[in-house]
Amino acid sequence: MSSKRAILVISFGTSQKETRDKCIGGIENAIATEFPDWEVRRAFTSRMIIKRILKETGVQIDYIDEALQRLADDGFDTVVVQPTHFIKGIEYDDVVRICGEFSGKFKALKVAEPLISDAASYERLVDILEKDIVPNIRTIAKDHCGVVLMGHGSEHINNSCYSEMALRIKFRGMEDVFLVTVEGFPSFDDLPKVMSGVKGRKVAMIPFMVVAGVHVNEDMAGDEPDSLKNRLASAGYEPIPIMKGLAEYSSVRRMFADKCGECICSL
């Protein structure tokens, strides 16, 4: 009897359909194209977003355990779980924990790595920033401006990934590309020190997040006084919001497909 194989793509989720299709759907499509012999399914880790989508659209998206149980009930025996999370933070830990509870229901069940997981993935993302994302942003902004990357941040110990990424960006020679986070370190309060080397007044702001969702609309480009846009404006800069999540870049979607492939090869 042949093996029945599935890839479960697990994302935090977003209630905004356009960015959900572009970013989460984009990653899922990239993985499905790369592995046509595997069935690709979706799950979200935010129960709030799951409930909101169901209420607004009638579409039911599974939580992690629901998706895994459905796969078991449907007769799948080999499952690769590909999280679309940025780092091994709180959400990723939840994915690993819950998958561990289902290990006995499958012949093989393995969780792949998030976007940033080792030195090679840091360097690959820095390459993408240098050769793809930053040039694209400056084309959109029509100016060789400074660039502020806004990450999510976390209270998890692996929030240190953002500091390492900031250093790797600087050591690559991108002196006018800066990184801050909404909920971690470096924070918005650190902007004056983080941006001490900026040369011009125009600054493009871009989400350093897989999906450009609520955090981007409110914390980055919102009208509240403490939004990144208004903090930059108050400091004398001319902020240019670029509402484009990382997963809108094919090079980032390719990273996730490769992570998934590495996991499949390790089975």
Image (tube, rainbow, N blue to C red):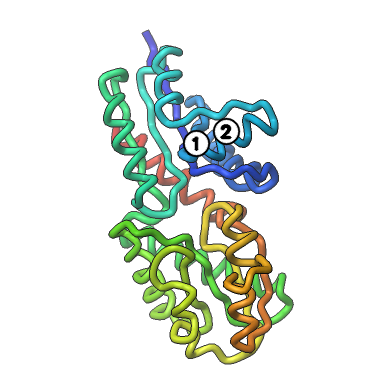
Residue 187, quarter of picture: bottom left
Of residue 117 and residue 33, the one placed in the foreground of this image is: 117
Query: Does 264 appear above or below 74?
Result: below
Q: Position of residue 122 (x, y in %)?
A: 38, 63
Tell me if 50 is positioned left or right of 193 in this view.
Answer: right
Kindly indicate whether the residue at mark 2 contacts the one at mark 1 (C-beta within 8 angstroms).
Answer: yes
What residue is rendered at 42% in x and 31% in y?
A: 64
Of residue 75 and residue 214, the one placed in the foreground of this image is: 214
Query: Does 201 appear above or below 256?
Result: below
Which residue is identified by label 1? 47
* Residue 136 visible to an observer of this rendering: no
What residue is rendered at 40% in x and 27% in y?
A: 65
Query: Does 72 appear above or below 198?
Result: above
Q: Position of residue 101 (x, y in %)?
A: 28, 27
What residue is rendered at 39% in x and 45% in y?
A: 91
Of residue 13 and residue 28, the one placed in the foreground of this image is: 13
Q: Position of residue 115 (x, y in %)?
A: 42, 52
Which residue is identified by label 2? 51
Circle 1 Cα neighbour tier, 10 Å, few/some/many (<14 / 14–19 / ≥20):
some
Q: Secondary structure at mark 1?
A: helix
Tell me if 28 is positioned left or right of 239 in this view.
Answer: left
Placement of the N terminus among the 4 image quadrants? top left
Circle 2 Cα neighbour tier, 10 Å, few/some/many (<14 / 14–19 / ≥20):
some
At label 1, the amino acid type is Arg
Tell me if 143 is positioned left or right of 156 in this view.
Answer: right
In space, the residues marked 1 and 2 are separated at their CA atoms by 6 Å
Pick out the residue farthest to the front.
Answer: 225
Placement of the C terminus among the 4 image quadrants? top left
At label 2, the amino acid type is Lys
What residue is rendered at 42% in x and 39% in y?
A: 82
**Disc sitting over residue 197 in the figure:** none
Q: Position of residue 37 (x, y in %)?
A: 49, 25
